[in-house]
Each structure stands twice: as C-alpha cells, then as structure tokens.
Amino acid sequence: MQENEVRAELVIPAPIDDVWRVLVDFGGYARWNPVMEYTEVDGVRTKVKAAKGTPFERDFEGELVSVEPHTVASQGGDPETFLGRHRWELSEVEGGTRLVNAESFTGTMAADVLAQTREVLVAEFDAFNQALRRVCTAGR
C-alpha cells in the first residue's frame, strides 16, 4: 500500500454484474450504506455525506471522473492542499467478486490529514465493503 493511500478489499460471493448494479445506484446508498450516501448527483458533480452519524461525519463535493464497467472513480478537494481520488474496482474471482475500495491523497496537507485519520478511514472503507457485501448477498 502506498503511504498516501487508504485501501480495503474483500470478496463478495455474488456475480460481478449484481455487485456493479448496487455500486452504481448512487441514489440507493441511503438504503443500505451505514457510512456514506450520495445526497446529490447532477451529471458528474456529486455531494456526499460520509461517516454518517459519527463524530467524523462530513459533507463534501466531488465529481465522478469515470464510471466504466466494473470501475468507478471520483475525486474531490483542492489539488494544491488536499485532493482525494477514490476508486472502486470490481473483478471476477473464484467464489464471486473482488471489491477494491481505495483512495489516494495528494496536496500539502495530505500527509498530516492521513496521519490523523487513517484508522478512521480504513474503518469507514471496511464498513462500506461489508455493507455492500450484505446487500449483494441478501436472500442468497
């Protein structure tokens, strides 16, 4: 793992297309995701609430950079001070779909912010992954 990256991954025992449909249904996040929801998606512009219901809850604006089959990339922040580039990557593996949930950070504040928040971010990424797994395997 790069020092400026936070990453969490797991295998979801569901077909990749099923996982993909849930992942790109941004309006549906509020129904299944305990840590993150898209409060607005207008074309590529987004508004996101992260760490819902915790002391670390935050709202931020960003943009969808790429939504291609099995990979979603977004970014937000100021390139000079603190920019986050997030991606979700799905790949077919034996037993289901591997989800990679990762974000890299750049800017003059990146090292300091990550030093203070890395554990919180890893926990948020893990919670996101587990929630996606639950919703994709419900009823199986």
Image (cartoon, rainbow, N blue to C red):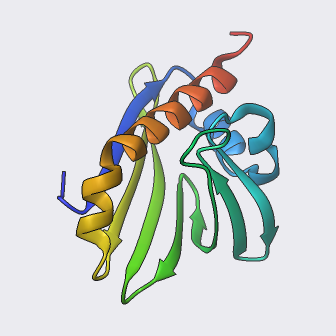
- In which quadrant of the rendered view does residue 93 lie? top left
Numbered circles on residues, count: 0
**Looking at the image, is 48 positioned above or below residue 65?**
above
**Residue 63, image x, y percentages:** 62, 75
**Looking at the image, is 11 positioned above or below residue 28?**
above
The answer to whether residue 122 of the structure is visible from this angle is yes
**Residue 135, image x, y percentages:** 69, 25
The residue most toward the front is 55
- Residue in the image at 81% along x and 65% along y: 40
* Nearer to us in this view, 81 or 66: 81
Q: Is residue 16 left or right of residue 3?
A: right
- In which quadrant of the rendered view does residue 62 lie? bottom right
**Residue 45, image x, y percentages:** 71, 77
**Looking at the image, is 120 positioned above or below residue 3?**
above
The residue most toward the bottom is 80
- Residue in the image at 62% along x and 40% along y: 35
- Quadrant into which the C terminus falls: top right
**Looking at the image, is 83 positioned above or below residue 125?**
below
**Residue 75, image x, y percentages:** 51, 72
* Nearer to us in this view, 100 or 111: 111
The answer to whether residue 91 of the structure is visible from this angle is no
Q: Is residue 29 left or right of residue 110?
A: right
Q: Is residue 131 left or right of residue 6?
A: right
- Residue in the image at 70% along x and 76% along y: 44
- Residue in the image at 78% along x and 76% along y: 43
